[in-house]
Image: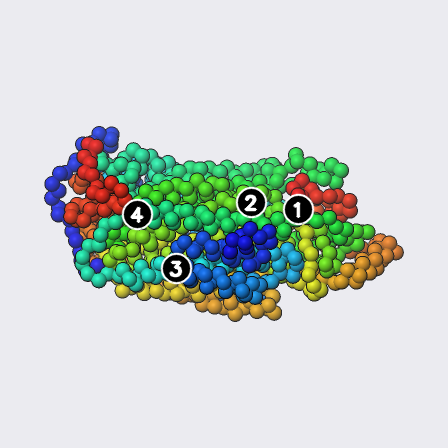
């Protein structure tokens, strides 16, 4: 257990054993030993506990953190639940006798203050380790500017390539697998939420400033995305897709699109009529880096 | 229930409530008006408290009915029961009513108003007329909020958090939004005045012998709640006024409309939508604890009485309450993890840290029951239900305090399930525990225990059936605040189960209405102290007389009524050199 605590990797073996370690002071050692050992042995074969495994490296990191938190929650929550149930069953009223009027027990009070602090610190350490991976912005050439609007999405690629879709026709963002994809996210009107469930990731699209994040898709496929932040009447219908293809296919696709734009600039899709950029954000940010809060 | 214990009517060492020189004259309206005029003109904290409770219960039932419509809409993926706009209005008003007009006012306007002066032996709140003003502002605000449904364009539909710039005049035209802002400004002032009253009352109107560390935990929690109200509500009210200015007077505090671009980048001479989120949650997160602490207080009254033991770790409990309050002012941005504009580790750590004092409370509650003689009355069942509900909501809360997990679940039904379990656990389970516990004191008659237990069990089952599927469907990616959803994603079955649960909960609240009618038609006298209560309010008559007390028992611990009734079973202090409680002479 100690070795896993100091292990630089925050993968699931480390997470689960470290999280359950402080519990050992509270529970019979054998029980914790069995639980910790079983998690150590099963490793990544832990159940998903209802979450997506994560189709990106970032999403996978979050997934492992989720597993660790879930196990910690099961152990701590289960322990408290057992205490409550025990009290309810064992101490239900049996006579009119007045029980001993105990009010303080210093040692118990110290233990139930200190142990949760230790648990919280451990959870925090694993949170920061995962967060630094999920939030990292590795340098890349694959850059896509996303503008959200009521009610649709605009994806801008280098070379003037645009993909725009709204309620009637959800747009598809094409990305390469195995490459760091940098997204610069804006909104043209109100707040929106860029959410891809299978990436285990969401980010607000705000008018007035640009936020950026990076993901690296693990395998090809199409992943559904949806707006998560209430944005008015048709919030429920603001869908998009992310289609991950191999890097060579992607390079090919982008070249074809850029050639099309060059041959016929009028073929570039426009924002639907009625959508106005009232945000102060650039409509077609071809050169800009991140905005005020970008990093 | 069967062991009705009335304390003797004659007290050996009576203290005259007017004789201890706290400057409260008393008796000036002992023979005031009766009937409806009494309700309209009263400054009696008990009458105002009951007005608050009745009004807030009406709001609760209305918001509950809205929830049923919301649930019905979601039983099928593309339901046409409600239009998108109606749906948006309903969840906005459901949240607004539940949070602003039920949970808070029920606790700090209703129960606290009624119980706090009784628990500290005070004749009334410190500022009775301000107290009356609070209620009338609250009632006016509540009616204003509901009037939103009848104005052109319909009620506000931007969610109970009113995120800018969706709440701007451009994106949400019509006076529904203005009515919503006005309603909240009114109830905001009402809450601020109540906060002033609670703090002043607990500081200045305690009876002789009632030192701060002899105040019951409920009163302690109401004091801390009062302070939190004074910290949080002025921020909301100011933020709302600025929002109103944005909507009507051409200011750009929360909007970036009309900003100029300099070299393609936004200049910062314009407003910021993020500012609204910061201000709102600087109110909103303390608000969460304003909605939780009073209910923790209720549970801490109910569990000891029905375990026949003192609160375990009383002082630790008080410090845990203060720690929660202090931390709650530094965690607001955990609602904003996905903005990409907040310092994640700071807010994550403080949010996780709140688990520590909350955990202390859990162990206090368990320690109180430990070695006790648990009586499962309706009030006790509701408090135990709270323990289960809040445990589940708390564990998922820890998960959400971790930013990467929040990224994955933010604004999905996972969060909806989390905060409903927390708020339902506190405001509903603990709130109705308090109602069943103090109803006999307020009306001098019992509620029917059999109907009460039906209420509890139906609600307990309905609670889990409603909210557990929401965790699952949230993890599958279903966003909140959607009126329709794709039919090919397997979300429907979870939503149907959730809706069934909601109707079970609704059924349980019919039981409460029946119970009210039964107790009204066939009163069962409660006596002064039907539960063998610990705290001062169980010493006086039910309902208490005008100005509450003619006599007080000696106050030598935080449970004077218990000490009076059980002189041979005083609190045992464990630990070195602290065994027998020292007899202390009352201050007067």
Tell me the residue at 45%/53% (across/down).
A22
Local packing at callout 2 (Cα closer than 10 Å; few below 14, some 14-19, many 20+) is many
Residue at mark 3 to residue at mark 1: CA–CA distance = 48 Å
Residue B572, which numbered label?
Answer: none
Q: Which residue is mark 3?
A: A28
Residue at mark 3 to residue at mark 4: CA–CA distance = 21 Å
Q: Which residue is mark 2?
A: B345
Q: Which label lies toward us, 3 or 2?
A: 3
Using the rendered image, report if marks 2 and 4 lie on a common chain. no
Q: Which label lies toward us, 1 or 2?
A: 2
Residue sitting nearer the eye, B351 or B328: B351
Residue at mark 1 to residue at mark 2: CA–CA distance = 18 Å
User: In the rendered structure, the residue with mark 4 lies on which chain?
Assistant: A
| Label 1 with label 4: CB-CB less than 8 Å | no
Residue at mark 3 to residue at mark 2: CA–CA distance = 33 Å
Q: Which label lies toward us, 3 or 4?
A: 3
Tell me the residue at 16%/46% (across/down).
B567
Q: Earlier in the sequence, mark 3 or mark 4?
A: 3
Tell me the residue at 80%/61% (across/down).
A248
SS for dot 2: helix
Q: Earlier in the sequence, mark 1 or mark 4?
A: 4
């Amino acid at each position: 257990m100690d070795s896993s605590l100091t292990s630089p990797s925050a993968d699931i073996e480390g997470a689960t054993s470290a999280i359950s370690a402080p519990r050992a002071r509270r529970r019979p050692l054998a029980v914790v030993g069995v639980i910790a050992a079983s998690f150590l042995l099963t490793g990544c074969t832990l159940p998903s506990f209802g979450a997506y495994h994560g189709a990106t490296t970032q999403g996978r990191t979050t997934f492992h953190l989720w597993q660790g938190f879930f196990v910690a929650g099961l152990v701590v929550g289960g322990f408290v639940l057992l205490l409550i149930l025990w009290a309810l069953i064992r101490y239900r009223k049996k006579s009119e006798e007045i029980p001993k009027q105990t009010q303080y027990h210093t040692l118990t009070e110290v233990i139930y203050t200190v142990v949760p602090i230790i648990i919280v610190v451990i959870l925090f350490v694993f949170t920061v380790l995962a967060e630094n991976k999920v939030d990292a912005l590795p340098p890349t050439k694959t850059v896509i500017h996303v503008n959200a609007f009521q009610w649709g999405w605009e994806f801008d690629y280098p070379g003037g390539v645009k993909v725009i879709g709204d309620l009637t026709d959800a747009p598809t963002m094409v990305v390469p697998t195995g490459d760091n994809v940098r997204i610069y996210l804006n909104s043209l009107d109100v707040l929106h939420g860029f959410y891809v469930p299978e990436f285990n990731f969401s980010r607000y699209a705000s008018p007035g400033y640009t936020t950026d994040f990076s993901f690296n898709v693990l395998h090809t496929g199409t992943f559904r995305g949806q707006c998560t932040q209430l944005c008015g009447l048709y919030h429920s219908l603001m869908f998009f897709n992310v289609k991950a293809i191999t890097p060579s296919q992607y390079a090919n696709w982008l070249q074809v699109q850029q050639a099309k734009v060059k041959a016929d600039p009028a073929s570039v899709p426009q924002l639907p009529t009625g959508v106005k950029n009232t945000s102060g954000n650039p409509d077609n940010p071809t050169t800009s880096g991140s905005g005020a809060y970008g990093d | 229930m069967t062991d009705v214990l009335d304390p003797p009517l004659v007290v050996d060492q009576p203290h005259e409530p007017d004789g201890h020189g706290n400057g409260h004259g008393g008796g000036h309206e002992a023979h005031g008006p009766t009937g409806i005029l009494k309700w309209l003109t009263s400054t009696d904290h008990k009458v105002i408290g009951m007005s608050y409770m009745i009004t807030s219960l009406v709001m609760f039932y209305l918001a509950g009915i809205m929830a049923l419509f919301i649930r019905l809409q979601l039983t099928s993926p593309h339901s046409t029961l409600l239009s998108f706009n109606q749906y948006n209005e309903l969840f906005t008003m459901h949240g607004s009513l539940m949070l602003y007009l039920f949970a808070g006012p029920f606790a700090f306007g209703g129960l606290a108003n009624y119980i706090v002066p009784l628990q500290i032996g005070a004749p009334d709140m410190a500022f009775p007329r301000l107290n009356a003003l609070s209620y009338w502002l609250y009632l006016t605000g509540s009616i204003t909020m509901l009037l939103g449904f009848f104005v052109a364009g319909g009620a506000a539909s931007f969610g109970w958090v009113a995120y800018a710039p969706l709440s701007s005049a451009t994106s949400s035209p019509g006076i529904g939004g203005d009515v919503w802002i006005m309603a909240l400004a009114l109830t905001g002032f009402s809450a601020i005045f109540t906060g002033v009253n609670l703090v002043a009352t607990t500081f200045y109107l305690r009876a002789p012998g009632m030192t701060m560390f002899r105040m019951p935990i409920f009163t302690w929690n109401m004091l801390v709640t009062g302070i939190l109200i004074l910290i949080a509500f002025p921020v909301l009210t100011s933020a709302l006024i600025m929002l109103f200015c944005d909507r009507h007077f051409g200011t750009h505090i929360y909007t970036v409309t009309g900003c100029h671009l300099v070299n393609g980048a936004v200049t910062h001479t314009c407003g910021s939508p993020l500012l609204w989120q910061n201000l709102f949650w600087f109110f909103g997160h303390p608000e969460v604890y304003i909605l939780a602490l009073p209910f923790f207080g209720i549970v801490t009254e109910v569990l000891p009485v029905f375990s026949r033991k003192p609160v375990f770790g009383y002082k630790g409990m008080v410090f845990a309450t203060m720690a929660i309050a202090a931390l709650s002012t530094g965690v607001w941005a955990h609602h904003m993890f996905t903005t990409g504009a907040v310092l994640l580790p700071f807010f994550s750590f403080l949010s996780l840290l709140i688990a520590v004092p909350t955990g202390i409370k859990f162990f206090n509650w368990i320690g109180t029951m430990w070695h006790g003689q648990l009586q499962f009355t309706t009030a006790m069942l509701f408090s135990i239900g709270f323990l289960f509900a809040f445990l589940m909501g708390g564990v998922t809360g820890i998960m959400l305090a971790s930013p990467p997990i929040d990224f994955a679940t933010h604004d999905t039904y996972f969060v909806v399930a989390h905060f409903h379990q927390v708020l339902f656990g506190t405001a509903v389970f603990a709130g109705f525990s308090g109602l069943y516990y103090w109803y006999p004191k307020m009306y001098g008659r019992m509620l029917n225990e059999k109907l009460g237990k039906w209420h509890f069990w139906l609600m307990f089952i309905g609670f889990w059936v409603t909210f557990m599927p929401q965790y699952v469907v949230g993890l599958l990616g279903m966003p909140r605040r959607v009126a329709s959803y794709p039919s090919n994603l397997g979300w429907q079955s979870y939503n149907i189960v959730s809706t069934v649960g909601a109707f079970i909960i609704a059924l349980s609240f019919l039981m409460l209405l029946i119970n009210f009618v039964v107790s009204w038609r066939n009163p069962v006298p409660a006596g002064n102290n039907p539960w063998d209560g610990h705290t001062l309010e169980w010493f006086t008559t039910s309902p208490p007389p005008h100005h509450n007390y003619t006599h007080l028992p000696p106050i030598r611990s935080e449970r004077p009524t218990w000490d009076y009734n059980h002189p041979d079973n005083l609190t045992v202090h464990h630990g070195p050199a602290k065994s027998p409680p020292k007899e202390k002479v009352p201050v007067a």
